[in-house]
Image (cartoon, helix red, strand yellow):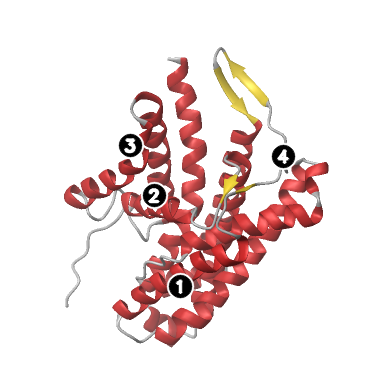
Amino acid sequence: MEAFFQHIINGISLGSIYALIALGYTMVYGILQLINFAHSDVYMVGAFIGFYSARWLNVSNSPGYGSFFSILGISMVGCALLGFTIERLAYRPLRNAPKLNALITAIGVSLFLEYSGQIIFGASPQVFPNILEDSIIASFGEVRITKFDATILLTSLGLMMILRYVISSTKLGKAMRATSFNGQWASLMGIPVDRIISMTFVIGSALAAAGGVLVGIKYPKIEPLMGVMIGLKAFVAAVLGGIGNIAGAVLGALIMGVAEEFVVGYGQSTYRDALAFGILIVILLFKPAGLLGRFSVEKV
């Protein structure tokens, strides 16, 4: 029973990271009806921005929450700018083009980031600097809660609460919801749709960067292709919860994280990646709109 609760804790910690990435997928899809395949590679860039920032600032000599939040902030700002640039240069010129064109462009941007990452950062894995010391902060028998787990959960929860506040209680959030409902109508009401879409990419990319830094402190090996598998899992989490639904993305990510942890703990660790695709097949067969998504008929 103690092992069961330990797996729950580990799964929630992992699911929190998936949630930060899944939110970027679901926000962009909710507004543009576009699967931004480059989003997972923005997460990779965020991890490397954190890596080099930590080395340049030499925070390994003074690990702690001050160093952690400094690196987190730098990484989020850097990826926010990257997300803005991707939207402005790659997606905005195709705003009125067929959706297939934008989808192919998203795949192209993803490949560009991956192979540019191998050229710039090197193809070999790197060890993320020690910006926060781990320790056991609570234990209940064999069940242990570490500083890393608590930091990941609280940081993810804090960012999600900020996102919820922005979407539900600010003018930007109201404009995002209006644009998501109908971009043309929103434009007629005076909402700067292009600016709102850019801000959606900025926010989603910043959240992905936070996920990259959190992965760096928990699983310190980073490399230019690290976004491929975790991006697929985060995408499956968004589909599981109902892509386009923010609460659904969080729910789906937590389910994914816990399920993966149980597969590793009680089954075969070699199947942990196959689990995501199994869940995707099941959800598309029996509830294609997702757990919290709404089914709608589209006239073509």
* 260 and 73: which is toward the camera: 260
User: Helix, strand or loop at disc 1?
Assistant: helix
**Distance of label 2 from label 3 (alpha carbons):** 13 Å
Q: What residue is at 43 percent from the left and 67 percent from the top?
A: 28
In the rendered structure, are the residues bearing label 4 and label 3 in contact, judged by CB atoms less than 8 Å apart? no
Image location (x, y in percent) of residue 30: 38, 66
Q: What residue is at 51 percent from the left and 60 percent from the top?
A: 168
**Distance of label 2 from label 4 (alpha carbons):** 26 Å
Numbered tag placed on residue 109 in the rendering = 1
User: Helix, strand or loop at disc 2?
Assistant: helix
User: Helix, strand or loop at disc 3?
Assistant: helix
**Distance of label 4 from label 3 (alpha carbons):** 31 Å
Badge 2 or badge 1: first in the primary sequence: 1
Image location (x, y in percent) of residue 164: 52, 55
**Distance of label 1 from label 4 (alpha carbons):** 33 Å
Numbered tag placed on residue 252 in the rendering = none
Badge 2 or badge 3: first in the primary sequence: 2
User: Helix, strand or loop at disc 4?
Assistant: loop
Tag 3: amino acid = Tyr
Tag 1: amino acid = Val
Above or below: residue 136 compared with residue 156: above
Quadrant holding the C terminus: bottom left
Tag 2: amino acid = Lys
Dot 4 corresponds to which residue?
A: 132
Q: What residue is at 33 percent from the left and 37 percent from the top?
A: 271
Callout 1 environment at 10 Å: few (<14), some (14 to 19), or many (20+)? some
Residue 191 visible in the displayed image: no
Q: Is residue 255 left or right of residue 47?
A: left
Q: How many marks?
A: 4
Dot 3 corresponds to which residue?
A: 271
Dot 2 corresponds to which residue?
A: 233
